[in-house]
Amino acid sequence: PREAVLDLLRRGVSTIHYWAAGHPAVEDEKFPDVAERRATTLALPVHQGLSTKDVDLIAEAVIQVLPKIVARRRHALAT
């Protein structure tokens, strides 16, 4: 998600890799779907302080970046 974070930031949207690390007592190999979700989940700004303009900016940035994210993910899965 590093590329997605940077792409969104270039468009004025701060985000974080929300769930980068799992619980130390859980082995990722036993739960590959959860490990995959952790590796690909980002948090977008969502709170009561956002204006309509802010929400529009976030939505437009996601619309622009999402196809790139999907393409990179598909490429990674194919290789």
Image (cartoon, rainbow, N blue to C red):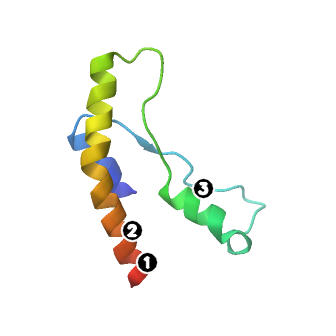
Image location of residue 52, percent across then percent down: 32, 18
Instruction: Give the residue pinned by disc 2.
Output: 73
Taking the view exactly as shown, the residue that stands out farthest to the bottom is: 79
* Disc nearest the viewer among 3 and 2: 2
Q: CA distance from mark 3 to mark 2?
A: 19 Å
Task: Return the mark for residue 31.
Answer: none
The amino acid type found where label 3 is placed reads Ala
Residue nearest the viewer, comparing 17 with 73: 73
Image location of residue 78, percent across then percent down: 40, 82
Task: Return the mark for residue 21.
Answer: 3
Label 2 environment density (alpha carbons within 10 Å; few <14, some 14–19, many ≥20): few
The amino acid type found where label 2 is placed reads Arg
**Image marks 3 and 2: residues in contact by CB distance under 8 Å:** no
Give the SS element for disc 2.
Answer: helix
Image point 21% across, 39% down: which residue?
11
Image point 71% across, 68% down: which residue?
31
Give the SS element for disc 1.
Answer: helix
Label 1 environment density (alpha carbons within 10 Å; few <14, some 14–19, many ≥20): few
- Residue 78 vs residue 65: left or right? right
